[in-house]
Image (cartoon, rainbow, N blue to C red):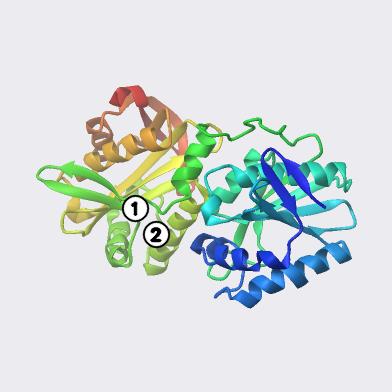
Amino acid sequence: MEIIEDGVLLRPWREADADAVHRACQDPDIQRWTTVPRPYLPEHAHGFVTELSGRAWAEGTGAPFAVCDPASGELLGSCGLISIDGDGTGEVGYWTAPWARGRGVTVRATRALARWSFETLGLRRLLWQAEVGNHASRLVALRAGFRIDGRLRLARPAPDGGPDGWVGSLLPGEVPEPGSTGPAGPGTLVARRAAVFGRPQPTLFATAGAGELRLRPMEEQDLDTVVGTCRDPETIRWTTVPDPYDHADARWYQNHCRELWARGDAACFAIADPDDRYAGSIDLRLSPSDPLLADVGFMTAPTARGRGLMPAALLALSAWGFTALGLARIEWKAHVGNVASRRVAEKAGFTFEGIARGGVPHRGERVDVWVAALLAEDLA
């Protein structure tokens, strides 16, 4: 059985593929995001291309394919049905050899596999799953026509991986034609965001006075100061941090920030002063309904207040949101009366727009909030 479409060849695995499979599966990304054994030994590769793949074909429980260059025969990756049930549903799984990445190989292979699954096998639905945070796999699925339907707990999480996964589905008639760009193609906002959130969270820099600030992920050394900041009366008055606040809350917030980055929903930064001491936190939260909109929230450590650090951090984060994430508008909201927060926003260039009555929930009631915004063209 062979499938040739759009410059890729899909064929059953052969014993001669074992060396290339072993070499490919030494790749850190394959080991990070899949359930291949670690360390991955030659006998694992040999067993995969002979026993495991052969058994799936013989029993009709799967259809594993090697993805190859049709001209040279070079192995480019793996793409196949890792399961087929009796109700006409198959699950797609794939990986790309590190030497073949950046060429759209797996997108083309997945489309070819999907078309064959529907037209030849008569399947009625394909499923795709990946650990939350695997933006490269998600982007392949989107470009192959899958609709990302939500999140679910994984039955077999990868070693050292997260417990939750994305799940998507594809139905007959939804596979993009060979050679077409399809959804989430290069240059789209989806592809841009996948490139950002598919990498480790960056460190941003800002200048405040004569010193340089760093906006970085929260670290262990920050937690004591975070607790102190969140116990401060002004923080409790103007934010929704738990009250009382302890180290378990700080640890939860640190882990939550990592989850938000993995999902591509938000970027949460600790602000470090020139001595790398925690000076505050600032979050950029993407709107779930408007891809060009985000809002900001921040708090300043009591010892860092009045030094002009937060306006510099807010401006740096906003500039990153416009350039890296392609945002068009960033909103700021604060309770009416929170003059310190309003001054930060205005110093960073936000334009005051009015009052939203009962605009946000706060400790069991709705409160009025000031609203301001910064647009991408404001920074230009």
Q: In this view of the protein, which residue sits in the foreground, 50 or 372? A: 50
Q: What is the secondary structure assignment of the residue under circle 1? A: helix
Residue 342's quadrant in the figure?
A: top left
The local crowd at label 2, few if under 14, some if 14 to 19, many if 20 or more residues have their Cα within 10 Å, is: few
Mark before the other along the chain sequence, 1 or 2: 1
Q: What is the secondary structure assignment of the residue under circle 2? A: loop
Placement of the C terminus among the 4 image quadrants: top left
From the viewer's perspective, tell me whether residue 362 is left or right of residue 145.
left
Picture layout, residue 192 above or below residue 230: above
The residue that disc 2 covers is 243
Residue at 50% from the left image edge and 45% from the top image edge: 265
The local crowd at label 1, few if under 14, some if 14 to 19, many if 20 or more residues have their Cα within 10 Å, is: some
As drawn, the residue found furthest toward the front would be 72
Can you give x and y, in whole percent of width and height, for residue 43 in the image? 64, 77
- Under mark 1, the amino acid is Ile
Q: In this view of the protein, which residue sits in the foreground, 230 or 186? A: 186
Badge count? 2
Residue 167 showing in the rendered view: yes
Q: Using the numbered discs, state the Cα–Cα distance from disc 1 to disc 2 in whole angstroms.
A: 7 Å
From the viewer's perspective, tell me whether residue 272 is left or right of residue 79.
left
Point out which mark residue 352 bears. Answer: none
The residue that disc 1 covers is 236
- Under mark 2, the amino acid is Asp
Residue 332 showing in the rendered view: no
Can you give x and y, in whole percent of width and height, for residue 297 in the image? 37, 43
From the viewer's perspective, tell me whether residue 41 is left or right of residue 173.
left
Residue 65's quadrant in the figure?
A: bottom right
Can you give x and y, in whole percent of width and height, for residue 3 in the image? 77, 46
Residue at 20% from the left image edge and 45% from the top image edge: 309
Residue at 70% from the left image edge and 34% from the top image edge: 178
Can you give x and y, in whole percent of width and height, for residue 50 in the image? 75, 70
Is disc 1 in contact with disc 2, using a CB cutoff of under 8 Å?
yes
